[in-house]
Image (cartoon, grey):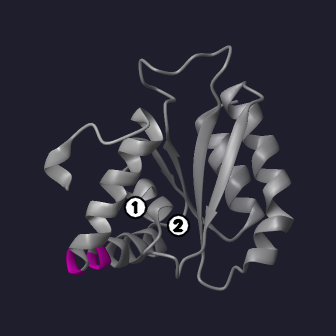
Amino acid sequence: MEEAYYLNEIKKIGGVICISEFGSYRTEYWNKDRSDIDLVIVVKPKVSFIDTLDIEDEILELSKQYYNYDNIHLTFVLFKDFPSKYARLAVDSNKKYIIEEEFWYDFQHYVLKYARNNSNFEKMLKIDEQYSYFGGIADESLL
């Protein structure tokens, strides 16, 4: 499936601002026989948790076709959840599929403003990332 077709089909579903890749995919640590592809789905302000349940299957199926891979994990981030770890992962992702630019720039602004005003949050994210990937603190300068 071509990227333009994938994005157009996602746009038809409605409510999606951006899809961001995170995790080991596109890194040297990704193993096709074992790893999954992690995607953060950022949704518009009026989309509720219940709404995400309604669109999850469609996005998952389209993503499986686009990536030509079955082991895909979706994590939804509501627009107001800018303090969450996954919101920051979406913003920091090297590969983003932005569906709604104006909403994306607002969301990104809120996430980065929150991070700037909450340095402890940033520290917690870095520590959490070390535990996730290394099973403990690998860089003590964060403590």
Q: How many marks?
A: 2
Disc 2, SS: loop
The residue lying furthest to the bottom in this view is 46
Vertical order, 6 against 75 (above or below): above
Report the span colored magenta: 113-117
- Between label 2 and label 1, give the one nearer the viewer: 1
The three-letter code of the residue at mark 1 reads Arg
Disc 1, SS: helix
Residue 133 percent location from the top left of the image: 43, 36
The residue lying furthest to the left in this view is 141
The residue lying toward the viewer, choosing from 132 and 76, is: 132
Question: Mark 1 or mark 2, which is nearer the start of the sequence?
Answer: 1
Residue 13 percent location from the top left of the image: 77, 62
Q: Which residue is mark 2?
A: 100
Vertical order, 126 against 119 (above or below): above
Residue 35 percent location from the top left of the image: 63, 25
The three-letter code of the residue at mark 2 reads Glu
Q: Quadrant of the N terminus?
A: top right
The residue lying toward the viewer, choosing from 119 and 103, is: 119
Question: Which residue does the image show at 62% across and 34% down from the upper left?
Answer: 37
Quadrant hosting residue 45:
bottom right
Quadrant hosting residue 27:
top left
What numbered label is drawn on residue 88? Answer: 1
